Amino acid sequence: MTGSDRTLRGFVGYGIKRAFSAIQSDVNATLAPFGLRMLTYSALAVIRDNPGLRQTQLAEILLIERPNLVLILDELEGADLVVRTRARDDRRAYELKVTLKGRRLCDRATEAVAAHDARMLEGMDESMRETLHQALRLIEMNGRSSDDRGKVSRP
Amino acid sequence: MTGSDRTLRGFVGYGIKRAFSAIQSDVNATLAPFGLRMLTYSALAVIRDNPGLRQTQLAEILLIERPNLVLILDELEGADLVVRTRARDDRRAYELKVTLKGRRLCDRATEAVAAHDARMLEGMDESMRETLHQALRLIEMNGRSSDDRGKVSRP
DNA sequence: TATTGTTATACTCTATAACTATA
DNA sequence: TATAGTTATAGAGTATAACAATA
């Protein structure tokens, strides 16, 4: 054996980092034929689920900062997948909608991502998948609550 | 409800991304008091487990490119946590070792990371943790094997 | 005064090509 | 010629401050 990471292997954080980087490169390869990346696909899929969404809301859902969303939407709008239209009731804001082209691409990409996801889950039975899903949700919540702890440090 | 990510929630990949970003910011906050980040800590811990390791081997274990390791080791060496010494049998290579100071810091940091890890696992019983661990391993392997598929495309 | 989207900017992580010194 | 470590560089992703238009 040439070297080991046995200390790190004890941590879930390490396992998640490695699982995520495996998934990330794989899913980006899956999305490349559609001209999409993980982030642009995510934005497209959420807008498709929520027509009329505002940019601030989308940023909140995807947990990214508003400035970082701008280029993503520029890219999607430039590819005619999404349109920004001024909101009638608040002319500062935009309503985000998916175009027909965007809807079609989103549906095909979603199929491809679903197939990719199934590949990543190969070798797990249904109960293992369900447990994994719940565990990831729990970790996300445990992380967010320690975020709060940090932020509420001066109340 | 202001907006939903229901399509994405169906994918493990999405769950892992969110769990990972929760962990990443949290673990970096945990390591900051030690002057470490996730990457520098990982390198330090692996060198501690494998005295005499070469940089190429370390890069392979951590799944990072050799050039990206250089600055990480510069940082660790600059902080007197790690030393690079020329290998006697191959004067191109360095043997990596942790200093006494590095060993002490690594042990304290490992405790902190372990505590952080335990926090992330709150609410899970032992069997759930074990299943999560196995599932992450499986995903990592499923991802790597599709890496291979890509690379072996021209044999 | 506060909020929406934006610009500018910077830092981290990642990826590749090309160099040097040894082998 | 091949390998170990390095340099330079470029691309993503992420984070913050400050601005214009609107509320």
Image (spheres, coloured by chain):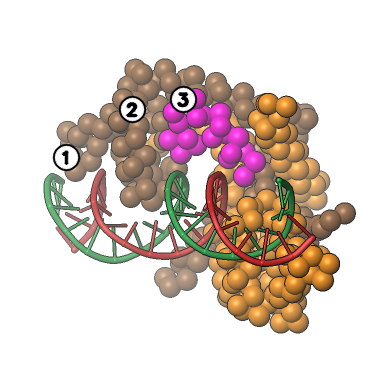
Chain colours: A brown, B orange, C red, D green
Picture residue at 82% right of the left edge, 58% below the top: A3
Looking at the picture, do discs 1 and 3 lie on one chain? yes
Question: Residue B49: horizontal and vertical position, in percent?
Answer: 80, 66
Q: Quadrant of residue A118?
A: top right
Sequence-wise first label, 1 or 2: 2
The residue under label 2 is which amino acid type?
A: Ala
Q: Which residue is mark 1?
A: A91
Picture residue at 62% right of the left edge, 44% below the top: A21
Which residue occupies the extreme right position in the image? A1
Residue B118 in view, yes or no: no
Q: Residues within 10 Å of mark 2 (few under 14, many from 20)?
A: few
Sequence-wise first label, 2 or 3: 3
- Which chain does the numbered disc 1 sit on? A
C11 is higher (above) or lower (below) than A137: below
Q: Residues within 10 Å of mark 1 (few under 14, many from 20)?
A: few
The residue under label 3 is which amino acid type?
A: Phe
Q: Nearer the viewer, residue B86 or A31?
A: B86
Query: Does the magenta portion include A26?
Result: yes
Q: Nearer the viewer, residue D2 or B75?
A: D2
Question: Residue A58: horizontal and vertical position, in percent?
Answer: 38, 40
B86 is higher (above) or lower (below) than A81: below
Left or right relative to A31: residue B19: right
Left or right relative to B128: residue B2: left
Q: Which residue is mark 2?
A: A79
